[in-house]
Amino acid sequence: MIRTLVTLAVGATMAIASECKADIKVPECPARTVFTFNTGIPESGPSCPLTSVSMCYTSTQLQLDFTAYNETNFYFDPKQETNEDIWEYEVVEAFIYKGTDDPQTYFEYEVNPNNVTYNSFVYNPSRIRADDAPFDHALIGDPFADGFAVDTKLDKQNHTWKSTNTIPLALFNGENPKGSTWRMNFFRTVTSPKTYPDQQLCGWKNTNAANFHITSAFGTVSFV
């Protein structure tokens, strides 16, 4: 009995410590946590247009909203459809992993100003997308049938676009996530007809390389 109580106390202490160390604490909807980034990657300075991320959760869904400020081009390929290479143009992105490790497999979600999404699990065993290691994607073939939702609106007069997104937590075996801690990172790419295919890379947690797929850089997100 004493051993059981000690085990429970240690477990509770570890959970509290993990939550306290979290970079972001995400509340149940309708409450929201909001944070911003404007860091260039890899130069690590406030060189990027501002991006805002708003998050909350229900028992079955992650609500994830992006607002891209200081937008001048709203640049995308109108021919591209779901799960095509929208990342070649302007997108906002979330990399999501259920757990606290530096992941080797994680979910990559992207949306562009044209309301087109990219939805895929990433297999990255090197954790850095090493040239001599495997690197692969497993696409979610029918995201809207699977419970995803997206609504993206452009406000060209105010140089802003906003995307409201729903991601099903069952994708991660992660329903009822309260009390759990995950790893995530968030990014934005900026380009224009004049500079394409060159891009400005922006992120929440700097990977210190022109490469978003460095998982040691993922931040820590607790569901409270």
Image: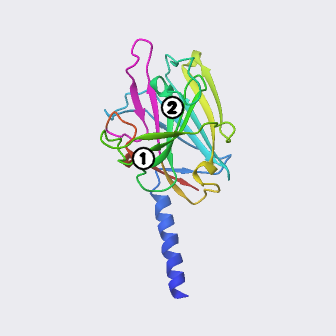
Residue nearest the viewer, comparing 3 with 156: 3
The residue sitting at 52% across, 53% down in the picture is 98
* Image location of residue 177, percent across then percent down: 60, 56
Write down the quadrant of residue 213 in the picture.
top left
* Three-letter code, disc 1: Phe
Mark seen at residue 98: none
* Image location of residue 9, percent across then percent down: 51, 76
- Residue 51 lies, with reference to residue 15, above or below; the image says above
- Residue 128 lies, with reference to residue 210, above or below; the image says below
Mark 1, residues whose alpha carbon is within 10 Å: few (<14), some, or many (≥20)? many
As drawn, which residue projects farthest toward the bottom? 1
Q: Which residue is mark 1?
A: 218
* Image location of residue 144, percent across then percent down: 67, 36
Name the secondary structure under disc 2: strand
- Residue 189 lies, with reference to residue 35, above or below; the image says above
Quadrant (top left, top right, bottom left, bottom right) of the C terminus: bottom right
* Three-letter code, disc 2: Val
Mark 2, residues whose alpha carbon is within 10 Å: few (<14), some, or many (≥20)? many
Write down the quadrant of residue 155 in the picture.
top right
* Image location of residue 63, percent across then percent down: 63, 42
Relative to residue 75, is residue 48 drawn left or right?
A: left
Name the secondary structure under disc 1: loop
The residue sitting at 54% across, 82% down in the picture is 5
**Residue 210 colored in magenta in the image:** no
Residues under labels 1 and 2: Cα distance?
16 Å
Q: Which residue is mark 2?
A: 92
Query: Which region of the structure is painted magenta?
Result: 184-208
The residue sitting at 44% across, 12% down in the picture is 193
Q: How is the image coloured?
A: rainbow
The residue sitting at 37% across, 28% down in the picture is 47
